[in-house]
Amino acid sequence: MFLDAEQRGGADDIHGDVAIVGAGPAGIVLALDLAHQGLDVVLVESGGRKFQPSVQDLGNAAEYDPARHAPMEDCTRRQIGGASVIWGGRCVPYDPIDFEHRTYVSESDWPVTYDEISSYFQRACDYFRCGRAVFDAHEIDAIEQKTIVPGLPDAEVRSSSLERWSLPTNFGHEFRRDLESSRRIQLLHSLTCTEIEVDDSGSRITALRCRSLGSGRALEVTARAYVIACGGIDTTRLLLASNRVHANGIGNHSDNLGRFYMGHISGRVARVCFTTPPRRTIYGFERDIDGTYLKRRFSFSPEFQREHELNNIVSFPVSPDIADPEHHNGVLSFAYLALASPMGRAFAADAIRKAAIGSGDDLRLLQHTRNMLLDPWSTLKFVPTFGYKRFIAHRKVPSFIQYSRSGIYPLHYHGEQVPNRESRITLSDQRDELGMRRVSIDLRYTDRDVDSVVRAHQYWDRYLRDQDCGRLEYLADDVEQSVWNQAGDGFHQIGTTRMSSDPERSVVGPDCSVHGVGNLFVASSSIFVTSGQANSTFMIVAFALRMADHLREVTLAKEV
């Protein structure tokens, strides 16, 4: 059931078997799975059913470098559904090599194996509504051409790996009826957890202290087990701020809480120029047998990564920069004008929209209008078809990629950012409306992050040339500087409560419980040891399902 903390009467405390902070993908999946297994769950969410700027402001950072980190309002959403409300829908798992011991990536040892976590991939796919847990074109019989262009074999470079796309699934909308109808779930929304209360020994959580923003009403939530699932940065912030007993924050016994902050390194520094027949280039989205959208990527074999000590990285063809009217393409100009219009927020999440349109001006608007007028038939053909697929169809096409008659496409890369202890999140002296200290963000990239991107492009270029399938053309003379200029994230908040069997090297253990605090768990990408090449949302849900199984065993068997 849904309970609005601003309107709720009755007692000032509430109890369940498990209390979860954060109703994003991890919190919702965990709550549903635990309820299905017979546990009573209290799910606490700072936001409500709809977006509220005043609530969203509670999560804004005090300090960050805008050249390296996006604003928190673009990365997170304090609302039922969490970041899935503004999520594009890309579902990608980590790779086996991400869980290996890699001597060339320091602090990269996971206490969990790939085989163990991959056993949850299908259950995660079911929640994401993204079909089968199959992420390689060779495993799908219906796909005849296994690589991006004909004649390009899968060897050291691969182009058969797939990303799957969700509906996209807004978890707050998709699972609303399940949450409302469950007799075992109490979803307390419009209620912010401001502190995790610890007993005098510091070894057990006794309650969650919560307050509503509007009325200021205080409420206490108690449970047998507690899970913090409010996003990478907000999870870390809450642990740091809960310092009445643990002076430096819960889980900061080894000074690792807030450290090793990672995202990904991504951008565009080259065009891929295929010399194969343009019509046989698989540049856009394909469909699986159940209608799920799929997308190909260039990657490297694990053997090649080990041999050349490469960070994990992928790349894929994309449309030209829609903001640049020099493309002289009516369809791309229509997309720009739609996103730049007052209705732009209805077409794409704000972060995606801002990145696409850049800083517009009147001259650019005129040039884009001219492109449409000179290319009217392509635009008129595109608009109704794409409009139906994007806004009316149940399974929506994720975006569009414009076909290139020349076989030339910008190449977007998305790569691993290696663990770095000096990249971190701390608390500032600035406080939000509920009195919680805001965070200061210091996201740092390293020479290894950049060098790996540069070398990956060199290897892709060499492989295409060796196979007589194409080449890369760089967009600037100084590729390394271009990668540095583009290095930034904030959308994938990884590593700040990292996991390990060794308490001196981590915040949580292999079961995701905070070391030394047996009944407190973390369900967030902040537990991840490495960032891999994959967006983190899919793996967050896979780990949440793993946690649900663990909590069922320990809470039904004994007090945790």
Image (cartoon, rainbow, N blue to C red):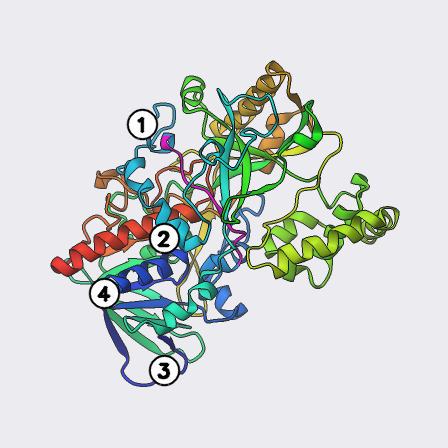
Distance of label 4 from label 2 (alpha carbons): 26 Å
> Residue placed farthest to the top in the image?
466
Q: Residue at x 59, y 56 (%)?
A: 349
Q: What residue range appears in magenta? A: 86-96
Instruction: Using residue 61 as the reference point, say whether residue 525 is left or right of it.
Output: left
Residue 242 seen in this snapshot: no
Do the residues under discs 3 and 2 have CB atoms within 8 angstroms?
A: no
Dot 4 crowding, Cα within 10 Å, few <14, some 14–19, many 20+: many
What amino acid type should be assigned to the residue bearing mark 2?
Thr
What amino acid type should be assigned to the residue bearing mark 1?
His
* Residue under pointer 4: 39
Quadrant of the image containing the C terminus: bottom left
Dot 2 crowding, Cα within 10 Å, few <14, some 14–19, many 20+: many
Distance of label 4 from label 3 (alpha carbons): 23 Å
Against 309, residue 247 (above or below) is below
Against 542, residue 453 (above or below) is above
* Residue under pointer 1: 101
* Residue under pointer 3: 8
Against 396, residue 102 (above or below) is above
What amino acid type should be assigned to the residue bearing mark 4?
Leu
Instruction: Using residue 69 as the reference point, say whether residue 428 is left or right of it.
Output: left
Q: Residue at x 43, y 68 (%)?
A: 176
What amino acid type should be assigned to the residue bearing mark 3?
Arg
Q: Secondary structure at mark 4?
A: loop
Which is closer to the viewer, label 4 or label 3? 4
